[in-house]
Image (tube, rainbow, N blue to C red):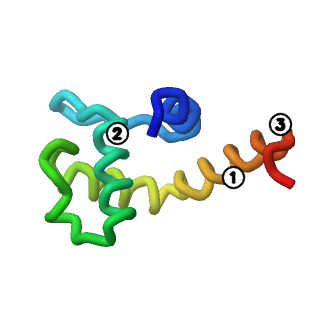
């Protein structure tokens, strides 16, 4: 994903949950989720470069429960439609 694509997606994603320790980088977690979705692998196989697999899984699960994925897709579709990128 390019930096420009990430900037657009980041604008519609919810913030990372507030925890006592320093939060992981949201892009790093998203890249781990995206890697897992592309490969179809199990969560434990997410490469270390994306941080602990548990962090990516918990963020994915939280956003799924909150409906964040559906909301992000809808917002991006509305924007693309308004810009006439969708026919």
Q: Is residue 54 left or right of residue 60?
A: left
Q: Is residue 69 above or below residue 27?
A: below
The residue carrying mark 2 is: 17
Q: Residues within 10 Å of mark 1 (few under 14, many from 20)?
A: few
Relative image position of residue 32 (x, y in whole percent)? 29, 50
Residue under label 3: 83
Q: CA distance from mark 1 to mark 2?
A: 22 Å
Q: Identify the secondary structure beneath mark 1.
A: helix
What residue appears at the point 17 percent right and 42 percent down from the top-left corner? 49
- Distance of label 2 from label 3 (alpha carbons): 32 Å
Q: Position of residue 82 (x, y in %)?
A: 85, 40
Quadrant (top left, top right, bottom left, bottom right) of the N terminus: top left
Q: Nearer the viewer, residue 67 or 24?
A: 24
Q: Residue at x 81, y 51 (%)?
A: 86
In x, y percent, where is residue 22? 19, 28
Is residue 27 or residue 21 the one in the foreground?
A: 27
Determine the image quadrant of residue 84: top right
In front of the other: label 3 or label 1? 3
Please indicate whether residue 35 sits to the left or right of residue 80 in the image.
Answer: left
- The quadrant in which the C terminus is found is bottom right
Q: Give the numbered dot on residue 74.
A: 1
Question: 28 or 54: which is nearer to us?
Answer: 28
Around disc 3, counting alpha carbons within 10 Å, would you say few (fewer than 14), some (14 to 19), or many (20 or more)? few
Give the mark, 2 or 3, whose residue is nearer the N terminus: 2
Q: Please name whichever residue, 34 or 66, is drawn nearer the observer in this view of the structure.
A: 34
First in residue order: circle 3 vs circle 1: 1
Contact flag, marks 1 and 2 (Cβ < 8 Å): no
């Amino acid at each position: 994903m390019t930096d420009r694509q990430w900037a657009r997606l980041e604008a519609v994603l919810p913030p990372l949950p507030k925890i006592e320790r320093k939060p992981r980088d949201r892009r790093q977690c998203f890249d781990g989720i995206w890697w897992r979705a592309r490969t179809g692998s199990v969560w434990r196989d997410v490469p270390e470069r994306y941080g602990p697999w548990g962090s990516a899984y918990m963020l994915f699960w939280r956003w799924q429960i909150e409906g964040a994925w559906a909301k992000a897709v809808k917002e991006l579709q509305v924007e693309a439609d308004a810009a006439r990128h969708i026919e």
